[in-house]
Amino acid sequence: MLHRHAGCHAALVLLACLAAFIAGAAQAQPRPSRVASLNLCTDQLLLALADRGQILSLSRLAQDDSISFLAHQVAGLPMNDGSAETILFERPDLVLTGTYGQQEQIALLRRQGLEVLPLGPWAGLEDGRGQIRALARRLGHPDRGEALITRIDAALERGRGIVPDRRSILVYERGGWVLAPHSPLSEILVHMGFRLHQEALGLDQGGVARLESIVTVPPDFMLVDAASSRAVDSGTALFAHPALAEAVPPERRLALPRRLTICGGPSTPVAINMLSNTVRAKVR
């Protein structure tokens, strides 16, 4: 038995040493000095975590202030057209991409020997924390990653349990789209004390909610895009429908600008703080 325990101990020590070696090797990677981003959400993280001199180019969406939280920071930075050919010409030492619709670009860039780091939409806040830490370490600024996570966690703590009586809420987006229950925004709402209304509509995984269903079984509150008060196309006309206005009137609608919720990252603590302030003002 003694020899058996000793053998297990030796194996554990070997595994610990191997893990330490792998971690050290990862930290030993040179800090990238030419980083290109092909995705709006990686643009935001790159702007928040990198030195300005490390940024080789950003996607063109980074300068659209209706969806880009850090659009005010991109003046003077080069924009790329998102094509693999353009990126190959730039010869970055790190490329940041999304995970949807960019698989062919990722494969091509990797075949040409470029380091590509795909970053997908956050599955939840813990996933987001891991993504921030991983990118901040790779960029050579782990302290900036921890600072951003601290801001997110502090905002969460300020908003904890501020909703009385587990009021129901429906996140209602253009075209009648309803957010999936398993998402960072849904997690934030539950953390504040809301009860998600998707299940009452039979949309356990999110999807398109029929106007008739919402009017028949209305939520206590709706969370909408701040721009939804203007019906500019068929996707936004639903918000102004008289039946919906009667079922969930403006005083029961909470609003956030789309640029705060479209990506997880530096906008997240701002979104949580703004939502907390709106909840305190409207939810009684």
Image (cartoon, rainbow, N blue to C red):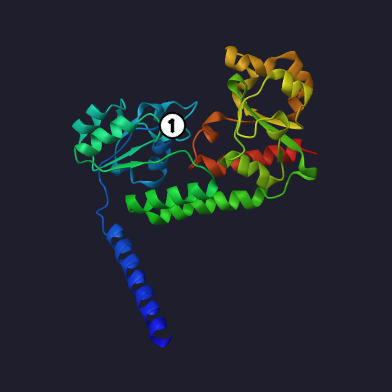
Residue found 68% across the figure and 50% down from its top: 160
3, 242: nearer the viewer: 3
Residue found 54% across the figure and 35% down from its top: 260
Asked whether residue 243 is in view, the answer is yes
* Quarter of the figure that contains the N terminus: bottom left
10 Å crowding of disc 1: few (<14), some (14-19), many (20+): some
Which residue of the protein is positioned furthest toward the top in this rendering? 233
Asked whether residue 273 is in view, the answer is no
Q: Is residue 138 above or below residue 123?
A: below
**Secondary structure at numbered mark 1:** helix
246, 212: nearer the viewer: 212
Residue 99 lies, in percent from the top left, at 39, 36
Residue found 44% across the figure and 26% down from its top: 64
The amino acid marked with disc number 1 is Ala
Q: Residue 21's image quarter?
A: bottom left
The residue singled out by tag 1 in the image is 71
Residue 57 lies, in percent from the top left, at 30, 34
Q: Is residue 119 above or below residue 25?
A: above
Residue 264 lies, in percent from the top left, at 50, 40
166, 76: nearer the viewer: 166
Residue found 28% across the figure and 26% down from its top: 83
Which residue of the protein is positioned furthest toward the bottom in this rendering? 2
Residue 194 lies, in percent from the top left, at 71, 41
Say whether residue 198 is left or right of residue 131.
right
Please tell me how many numbered marks the rendered image carries: 1
